[in-house]
Image (spheres, rainbow, N blue to C red):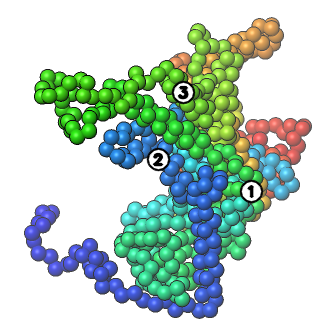
């Protein structure tokens, strides 16, 4: 392989230089629009202007500031912004109280294990029990893939700091050479970039907004990598608007530098239209439908979360930083004045007789000044510095600031000695109670984002990934997405692995038998696994209604989970003794719970798997059970659900008298 020589002349001109030259020599082109296109552009510009004017209005709810002014005020308070000196002798002070308390609140919230749980019903209100559980497991797995722990850190910080948090559920497409990867992802939007169509609609009714505008500023070069192949990109020019009021093309919402463009997405679920303006150029030639299905409860693929509502007819809310920032300002000013008073006591201002001017250096140790006596000077201020009453006032301000930030009595401090399960649970309840509305806001966010994630999966992840040649049938078959979830509580109470495979055809009896044998073999080897298949064709045909709830659960391996395990085990032994052996503790399950609670795998020795009986055959190595990874439990009562889902384990189940219609366990 030849070495790269930077000094060697090449015939090909640098792509970077060509790109710069293209921008310099690009001449603005005039876009000609039809009458209907002009009307659509004018309508969109009216929406953008109306949304901007609403948000830029100084409001009482924002302490007589605009939303943007209030946003930066909160941001500076959270970041302990140290303002410049107004004059040379001023002391710069920022105690960082809010910054510290925000970190305490974040640590408390992020330490909670808030987990979503899902249920789904058909149009006859029959619960599709196992499908809801499977989809929540898929949600869990997609969260792991996108590493959403990092997202929740930023989310909680924005929630505590600003008056609203906006989160978008997106199907992110990433291309790596010849490979295209789809990934479900949560995107956090700054409130500065979201313009509401009606600020009088509360956040809990965000999905009823008539329209919203999403705003993005980027460099011209970055925008070209996204839109360079679009038909109307050639009409886009960087920089501020230099046209005339009569020509709406070239509209700018904000001031831009000469290398920037602004991108405005107008989302209108009422007319089911999605438009994009880039530096005033409408990028959609014809009206384009929203890239998601508009249904009740989901007009947008976004959610808006606030902590505390300011009014039943106002979108934005109030957060701890907004309540505490003025108290911190008072505290900073108090400390500044106390420092000033201390300086005055140490070096009081001095008065001299008229006509005499002395350098302050005469007060330096060992200095000599001629013709000067102590009677030639007089103190203009005479006090002993900061008093106890002033310290008490500072302490009062600190206490009041604590009230706004709710960190003084979080209830996370454990009493001395060993705790009972009741005491441990009470501590957790106290922590949630004291954080109150903040915890509820995070729970709403996890509920709503899980709801949007389910529909994202249904709309974008049930299509075939590719086609593959089946060597047995010599036919092309579709390959669908598969999700593998570890550490799942299976239907037998054991913790193991679950594999969920989308498919477009029902399982054959041979496939079910192979999968069942594979699961039994893995169970005997101490590797519990359940394989489930979801028929995407029937999934799309059914009208389903999804419901998500969020609960606080003990973190496995935490002190609370250990205390609860000890209490559960003691009560189980008590029941066994009280029933005189009629009810016995399942010690295998108790040992498994122990290993999970203390996070000590293989703490107990496992018995060698029993040999298969004469009537049983070892699964053959045809690979169907492992390759297909398809098995699912069915709907509880719905006949359509029974057709859509199939399971290999049902062949060993006996029908229940109370559940005759449930033909799949």
Count of picture labels: 3
- Seen at 38% across and 65% down, the residue is 177
Counting residues from the start of the chain, the first of labels 3 and 2 encountered is 2
For mark 2, give the secondary structure. Answer: helix
Q: Nearer the viewer, residue 580 or 408?
A: 408
Mark 3–mark 2 Cα distance, whole angstroms, equals 25 Å
Count neighbours of disc 3 (C-alpha within 10 A) and say few if under 14, some if 14 to 19, many if 20 or more.
few
Q: For mark 1, what is the residue? A: 313
Can residue 631 be seen at all in this image of the molecule?
A: no
Proximity of marks 1 and 2: CB atoms separated by less than 8 Å: no
Lateral position of residue 256 relative to residue 53, left or right: left
**Tag 2 or tag 1, which sits nearer the N-term?**
2
Mark 3 lies on residue: 393
Examine the rendered structure and indicate whether residue 294 appears above or below residue 275.
Answer: above
Residue tagged 2? 76
Q: Earlier in the sequence, mark 1 or mark 3?
A: 1
Mark 1 secondary-structure assignment: loop
Q: CA distance from mark 1 to mark 3?
A: 38 Å
Rendered position, 589 above or below 269: above
Point out residue 25 in the picture as x, y percentages from the top left corner.
30, 85
Residue 438 in the figure: left or right of residue 333 = right
């Amino acid at each position: 392989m030849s070495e790269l020589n930077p000094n060697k002349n090449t015939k090909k001109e640098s792509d970077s230089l060509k790109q710069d030259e293209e921008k310099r020599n690009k001449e603005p082109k005039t876009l000609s629009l039809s009458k209907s296109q002009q009307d659509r552009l004018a309508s969109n510009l009216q929406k953008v202007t109306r949304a901007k004017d609403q948000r830029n209005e100084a409001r009482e709810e924002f302490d007589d500031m605009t939303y943007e002014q209030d946003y930066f005020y909160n941001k500076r308070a959270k970041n302990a912004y140290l303002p410049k000196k107004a004059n040379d002798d001023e002391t710069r002070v920022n105690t960082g109280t809010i910054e510290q308390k925000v970190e305490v609140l974040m640590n408390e919230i992020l330490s909670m294990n808030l987990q979503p749980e899902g249920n789904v019903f058909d149009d006859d209100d029959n619960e599709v029990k196992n499908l809801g559980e499977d989809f929540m497991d898929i949600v869990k797995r997609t969260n792991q893939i996108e590493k959403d722990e990092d997202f929740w850190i930023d989310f909680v910080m924005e929630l505590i700091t600003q008056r609203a948090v906006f989160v978008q559920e997106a199907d992110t497409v990433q291309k790596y050479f010849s490979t295209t990867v789809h990934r479900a992802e949560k995107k956090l939007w700054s409130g500065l970039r979201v313009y509401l169509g009606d600020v009088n609609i509360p956040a809990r009714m965000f999905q009823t907004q008539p329209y919203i505008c999403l705003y993005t500023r980027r460099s011209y070069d970055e925008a070209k990598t996204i839109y360079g192949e679009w038909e109307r990109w050639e009409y886009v020019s960087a920089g501020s608007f230099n046209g005339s009021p009569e020509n709406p093309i070239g509209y700018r919402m904000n001031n831009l530098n000469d290398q920037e463009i602004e991108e405005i997405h107008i989302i209108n679920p009422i007319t089911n239209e999605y438009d994009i303006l880039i530096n005033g150029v409408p990028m959609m030639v014809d009206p384009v439908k929203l890239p998601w299905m508009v249904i009740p409860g989901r007009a947008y693929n976004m959610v808006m979360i606030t902590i505390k509502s300011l009014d039943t007819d106002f979108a934005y809310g109030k957060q701890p930083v907004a309540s505490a920032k003025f108290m911190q300002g008072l505290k900073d000013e108090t400390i500044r004045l106390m420092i000033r008073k201390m300086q005055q006591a140490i070096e009081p201002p001095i008065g001299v007789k008229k006509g005499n001017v002395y350098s302050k250096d005469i007060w330096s140790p060992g200095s000599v000044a001629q013709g000067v006596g102590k009677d030639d000077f007089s103190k203009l201020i005479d006090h002993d510095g900061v008093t106890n009453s002033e310290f008490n006032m500072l302490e009062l301000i600190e206490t009041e600031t604590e009230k706004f930030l709710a960190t003084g009595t979080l209830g996370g401090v454990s009493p001395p000695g060993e705790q009972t399960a009741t005491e441990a649970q009470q501590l957790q309840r106290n922590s949630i109670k004291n954080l109150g509305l903040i915890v509820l806001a995070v729970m709403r966010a996890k509920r709503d984002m899980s709801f949007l994630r389910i529909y994202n999966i249904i709309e974008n992840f049930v299509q075939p990934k590719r086609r593959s040649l089946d060597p047995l049938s010599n036919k092309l078959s579709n390959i669908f997405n598969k999700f593998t979830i570890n550490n799942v509580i299976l239907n037998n109470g054991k913790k193991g692995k679950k594999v969920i495979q989308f498919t477009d055809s029902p399982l054959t009896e041979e496939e079910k038998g192979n999968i069942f044998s594979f699961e039994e073999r893995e169970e005997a080897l101490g590797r519990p696994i359940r394989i489930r298949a979801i028929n995407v064709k029937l999934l799309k045909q059914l009208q389903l209604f999804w419901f998500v709830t969020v609960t606080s659960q003990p973190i496995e391996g935490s002190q609370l989970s250990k205390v609860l395990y000890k209490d559960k085990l003691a009560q189980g032994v008590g029941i066994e003794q009280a029933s005189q052996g009629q009810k016995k503790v399942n010690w295998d399950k108790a040992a498994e719970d122990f290993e999970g609670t203390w996070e000590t795998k293989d703490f107990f020795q496992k018995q060698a798997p029993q040999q298969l009986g004469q009537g049983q055959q070892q699964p053959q190595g045809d690979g169907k059970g492992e390759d297909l990874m398809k098995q699912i439990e069915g709907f509880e009562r719905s006949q359509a659900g029974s057709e859509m889902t199939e399971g290999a384990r049902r062949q060993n189940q006996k029908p229940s008298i109370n559940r005759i219609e449930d033909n799949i366990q």
